[in-house]
């Protein structure tokens, strides 16, 4: 049997697309039990790989800084007559991390026990010093030249490292108690297959998978209300709303891949969610190549969708957003102030126009813009798009809309975290074109919300900005937005930001 390509579902039929969007509109009513469970998982979790990476980074910096400190106190750091005060600490820090990795010293779920880890730290630091002594001996370097430096480096490094481990242990114990280091999973599909997967996961040592509930469309003997002690919280359509009320990391689909139509219909509903989606290979005799498999703990799965811009990518993107937005606000502050004064003098009403729009994971966010319409003509629900020579637009508003100056207050949205600098443009809830909702016009529209919306984006620099007065314009925007989501990189964000000012010179669709 060939590997399933879920993307074939997204172009398979208009019937599935319509069913998907109907599910979104009807999924707001979930059971009280599902809402209660969702509230228990509303806190944000910390990805173990990121915690491990931060611990590794702190180890590297500590060993390096202590090496430099030891040199400033005692001198030394010599090899064959040459002083290497910077090279030795950097190389030593890298070697220390390698020794810790070889001793499994960065297993986050075992860091709640301090004693074994202190032994690994002491052993790695000892091996580091012994290695330097051996290199010095083989190179003919006099031991006296490095004795004081190595002694101070070893002592300071151990003291600071052990202190840091004590602090890290306290944090990890607290996070584990609060459920911050768990990976939260929802099982899609009930009955005996779901029970076997749950039992398999819970039997694993140091299991960090937390089952949050079960969702299944079936309501018969094959799918009882309680499976392996976990309640069935609703249907697959209910899962879409549930995932927006809580912080979950992955979906594990237990339905046999041989039930192809059912799997594809289900994935068509779920692919819009910003989650990892796995097909369980636990029960199926699938003929996939071994490299196709991924593992959730020890459970073999076939990864179907991966959460976009996750882990380190999200951290780097957020840091990039904050630095660039803060810098832009400082640099553009005269323009911001001048625009505010001009708007106030031009017409009555507030300077800032606040509007609810759809943000990450389809959540509503308040977006700021400079007011460009007469206050009495404000259109909070965007029921009528601004068109060419629209008499609702003020004199100063016409200029700031054409130059996109009206979007600059969204830099403050970026600082607050509701928007990103680059991403799909946020739209107003229930926005329409030709009397049809956006999600009814463009298949995959809801998938735009798998990432945080942005001030500018891939669609905008390709000319898809301004009024949406026909279905093709919306479809092109959605296609470009999905391309951005699936191909994101920090260099791509830099390119979009660099090109955006040049593209603003084209004012054909800006009214």
Image: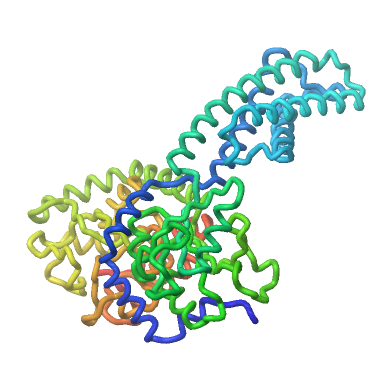
Q: With respect to residue 454, does 437 lie above or below? A: below
Q: Quadrant of residue 149?
A: top right
Q: Indicate left or right for 169 with 369 as reference.
A: right
Residue projecting furthest to the front: 221
- Residue under the point 31% across and 50% down: 413
Residue 301 position by quadrant: bottom right
Q: Is residue 132 above or below residue 434?
A: above
260 vs 465, nearest the viewer: 260
Report the number of numbered marks. 0
**Front residue (pair 96, 477):** 96
Residue 263 screen position, x and y as percent: 49, 77
Residue 321 coordinates in the image, percent (x, y): 42, 48
Q: Position of residue 152 (x, y in %)?
A: 71, 15
Depth check, front residue: 92 or 169 = 169
User: In this image, 313 relative to 2: left or right?
Assistant: left
Residue 256 percent across, percent down from the top left: 55, 75
Q: Residue at x 46, y 47 (%)?
A: 320
Q: Which quadrant, please, contains the N terminus?
A: bottom right
Height in image: 463 above or below 80? below
- The colour scheme of the drawn protein is rainbow
The residue shown at (56%, 80%) is 258
Work out whether residue 393 can be spotted.
yes
Quick check: can you spot residue 500? no
Give the quadrant of the C terminus. bottom left
Q: Residue at x 55, y 53 (%)?
A: 202
């Amino acid at each position: 049997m060939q590997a399933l390509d879920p993307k074939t579902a997204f172009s398979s039929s208009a019937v599935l697309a319509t069913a998907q969007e109907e599910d979104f509109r009807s999924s707001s009513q979930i059971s009280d039990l599902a809402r209660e469970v969702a509230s228990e998982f509303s806190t944000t979790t910390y990805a173990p790989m990121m915690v491990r990476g931060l611990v590794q980074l702190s180890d590297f910096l500590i060993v390096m800084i202590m090496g430099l400190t030891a040199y400033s106190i005692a001198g030394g750091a010599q090899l064959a007559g040459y002083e290497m005060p910077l090279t030795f600490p950097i190389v030593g820090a890298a070697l220390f991390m390698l020794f810790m990795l070889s001793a499994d010293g960065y297993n986050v779920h075992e860091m709640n026990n301090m004693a074994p880890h202190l032994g690994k730290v002491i052993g790695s630091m000892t091996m580091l010093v012994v290695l330097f002594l051996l290199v010095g001996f083989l190179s003919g370097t006099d031991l006296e030249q490095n004795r004081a430096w190595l002694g101070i480096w070893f002592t300071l490094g151990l003291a600071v490292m052990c202190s840091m481990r004590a602090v890290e242990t306290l944090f990890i114990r607290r996070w584990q108690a609060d459920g911050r280091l768990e990976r939260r999973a929802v099982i899609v599909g009930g009955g005996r297959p779901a029970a076997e997967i749950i039992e398999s996961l819970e039997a694993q040592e140091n299991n960090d998978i937390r089952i949050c509930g079960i969702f299944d469309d079936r309501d018969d003997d094959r799918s009882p209300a309680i499976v392996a002690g976990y309640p069935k919280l609703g249907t697959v359509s209910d899962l879409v709303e549930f995932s927006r009320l809580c912080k979950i990391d992955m979906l594990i689909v237990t339905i046999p891949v041989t039930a192809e139509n059912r799997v594809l219909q289900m994935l068509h509903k779920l692919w819009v969610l910003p989650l990892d989606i796995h097909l369980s290979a636990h029960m199926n005799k699938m003929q996939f190549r071994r490299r196709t498999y991924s593992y959730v703990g020890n459970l073999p799965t076939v990864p179907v969708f991966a959460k976009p811009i996750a882990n380190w990518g999200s951290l780097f993107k957020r840091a990039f957003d904050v630095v660039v937005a803060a810098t832009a606000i400082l640099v553009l502050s005269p323009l911001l102030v001048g625009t505010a004064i001009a708007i106030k003098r031009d017409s009555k009403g507030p300077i800032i126009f606040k509007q609810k729009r759809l943000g990450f994971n389809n959540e509503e966010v308040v977006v700021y813009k400079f007011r460009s319409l007469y206050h009495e003509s404000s259109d909070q629900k965007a029921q009528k798009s601004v068109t060419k020579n629209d008499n609702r637009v003020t004199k100063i508003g016409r200029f700031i809309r054409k130059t996109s100056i009206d979007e600059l207050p969204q830099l403050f949205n970026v600082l607050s975290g509701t928007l990103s600098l680059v991403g799909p443009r946020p739209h107003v809830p229930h926005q329409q074109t030709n009397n049809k909702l956006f999600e009814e016009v463009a298949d995959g529209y809801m998938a735009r919300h798998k990432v945080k919306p942005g001030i500018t984006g891939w669609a905008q620099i390709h000319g898809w900005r301004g009024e949406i007065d026909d279905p093709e314009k919306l479809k092109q925007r959605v296609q470009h937005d999905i391309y951005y989501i699936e191909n994101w990189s920090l260099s791509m964000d830099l390119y979009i930001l660099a090109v955006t000012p040049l593209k603003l010179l084209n004012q054909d669709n800006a009214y």
